[in-house]
Image (cartoon, helix red, strand yellow):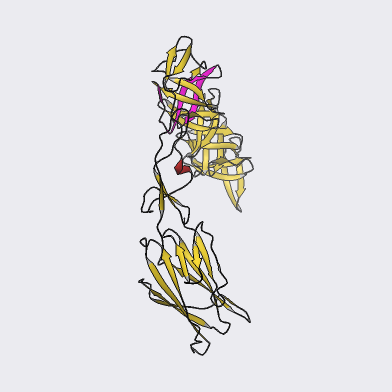
Amino acid sequence: MNKLISVFLALLMLLGISVSALAWTYDADSKTLTVCPHEDITLTVEGPAAASFAQITVTGSAEGNTTAKPSSASDSKTVFKVPFSASKGAADGSAFKVTFQYYDADKQDLGKDATYTVRVVDNMKQTAAVAATCTSVGNPNYYTCSICGKHFADVAGKQALSSKDLVTEKTDHHWVANGVQFKCSLCGAITTENVSGKTDNFTGFMKKDGKYIYYVNGNRSSASSDVVYGTINGSTGWYYIEKGVFTKTTTIAKNAHGWWRIENGKVNFKYNGIGHNGYGWWKCKNGKVDFSYNGIAHNENGWWKCSNGRVTFKETGVYKNENGWWFCEHSKVKFNYNGLASNQFGTWVIKNGKVNFKYNGKYRYNKVNFTVKNGKVV
């Protein structure tokens, strides 16, 4: 996102110029402002106090003539703020003449015209690429504008880079078995962590820079997310990883064997309830999402109607589980509901959210009397 830079030109006394870019300059004698082609500009200009509007003419650009009214005024001056886009993307060495012609409220020329030059300098400094190693970060090849300080992937300044883009992360060590230890064949580092079975074809977790990295056949896992089997801090189990790194979170995540309840980064095979991830809320049995489940199950937030293992939040009606038949609204059991509700089998008397199969007789609901037998309207 381009910065909006205000360039202050003092017209009458030529008292100076204030800029926020690193190396922009204004020469008062020649009335020349030097800029780069990578920034948007707003010229903030002081005009005569009697000025009602200004006509701005840009020579050397397709912008043509424009008019502007002052953004503020006082007894001694007016102030005009004029966006200037001609220099954005212009070639090195381009120059534009900007003339301000001031008029009073009667459209009379005040005779205090002023012309300035905006000169474009495209001065890029190259930083050569440095390859990252297993012991140090690197950087890509990039260019830095000496005027505005921005970084770009190309010398033309078309592809801007952030500070993060200027760093390439360390590469992985290449561990090779070395007796009871493992040695990096690239830098010579030694590790004794999780040494059991670790070879060039090692599959499992290895601790690096305080993080547990998962490797498959000696290569760091490239999966954006996965649930994998390994050992961390002496505890073996199924762990959740993101971009190859053990991630301590609570969610529902999948691997080739199904969808699993993750707690603090590890599968909890004892979990029986409804857990959630970014895709929804899911019924779990023994830690695994049960896509065959159609019924009512609970978690810490209540009891919920599940269809194919998922809470849809769209189901309203009477549904059953092993404990009875229940009235649900937006898939949640409404224990405070007393009245009538229906499903595909009929209309039922509901007491405290549950079908009352013991009810027989007349039942008044919404000012209408119904005949009920065994909890069902007949």
When the figure is inspected, residue 265 is found, relative to residue 154, above or below; the finding is above
The quadrant in which residue 258 appears is top left
- Percent x, y for residue 230? 48, 20
- The residue under the point 43% across, 39% down is 139
Q: Which residues are magenta?
A: 218-242
Foreground of the two, 231 or 20: 20
Q: Residue at x 48, y 26 (%)?
A: 213
The spot of residue 174 in percent (x, y) is 42, 22
- Picture quadrant where residue 56 is located: bottom left
Task: Decide whether residue 142 is among the magenta residues.
Answer: no
Q: Position of residue 348 (x, y in %)?
A: 55, 41
**From this viewpoint, which residue is outermost toward the top?**
179
Q: Nearer the viewer, residue 330 or 175?
A: 175
Q: Is residue 355 visible?
A: no
* Residue ID at (43%, 30%): 133
- Asked whether residue 237 is drawn in magenta, I would say yes
Left or right: where 85 falls relative to 361 = left
- Can residue 341 be seen here? The reply is yes
Q: Nearer the viewer, residue 260 or 137?
A: 137
Q: Height in image: 277 above or below 113?
A: above
Q: Main secondary structure of the magenta part?
A: strand
Could you tell me residue 221's position as x and y percent? Answer: 42, 27
The total of numbered circles placed on residues is 0
